[in-house]
Each structure stands twice: as structure tokens, then as C-alpha cells.
Amino acid sequence: MDKKLKKYIERYDLIQNCTSYELMPNGGMIVLINQDTNCEVMIDHQAHTLESFRAILINAYEEPVTIKTDDMLDLIAVRFKGAGASFF
């Protein structure tokens, strides 16, 4: 990974082998990358469909994000520090 990009990333999480997951806010942005089945992403009581092999940029400053699917989840959540995602 490029050193310039790495300094803006807080951490990344693998989300696997579950049907629902809650991402807690971290005061930054999250890039959620779906690697398999379609899932539903609930942000501030609004549902968004995240199709397979797609990504979504989430403002995770205050509200938790809930992810649900009928099948097993296979996602990567890349958490950025503060305004770090704007450099991505």
C-alpha cells in the first residue's frame, strides 16, 4: 500500500460469516467494499442496497451503520481518520 494513503487509514475490518453487523461511528469515513452477495445498509433509518462487487463511502461521524443480508456477509470496511477519505 502506498505510504501516503496508509497514513490516512485508521484500520480495516473483515466482516465475514454473519448475516448482520453493526459498524460503530469513528469520527471519520468508512469505505465499505462488498465482495459477494447483495446486502442492505441502514444509515440513519434509511435503507440502501449494496450490490455485489460494489463499494460505498459512508460518513460515520455519529450514527451507527447496520448491514443485513439473508446470506453470509463478505465485506471489507476501510476506516479513515477524520478527513482522510478526501485524500483517497
Image: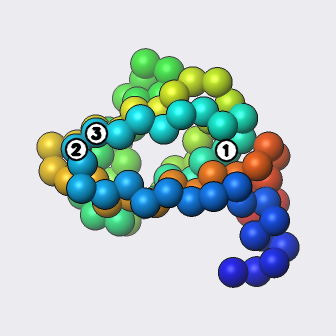
Labelled pair 2, 3 in contact (Cβ < 8 Å): yes
Residue to which mark 2 is pinned = 19
Q: Quadrant of the C terminus?
A: bottom right
Occupied quadrant, residue 70: top left
Q: Residue at x 58, y 41 (%)?
A: 58
Find the distance from the CA under tag 2 to the CA under tag 3: 4 Å
Q: Nearer the viewer, mark 3 or mark 1?
A: 3
Find the distance from the CA under tag 2 to the CA under tag 1: 23 Å
The residue type indicated by label 1 comes to Met
What x and y, as percent, mark residue 86? 79, 53
What x and y, as percent, mark residue 82? 79, 43
Residue to which mark 1 is pinned = 29
Q: Residue at x 60, y 33 (%)?
A: 25
Whether residue 82 sits left or right of residue 31 in the image: it is right
| Residue 20 numbered mark, or none | 3
- Secondary structure under tag 2 reads loop
Residue 43 drawn above or below residue 15:
above
Whether residue 42 sits left or right of residue 71 in the image: it is right
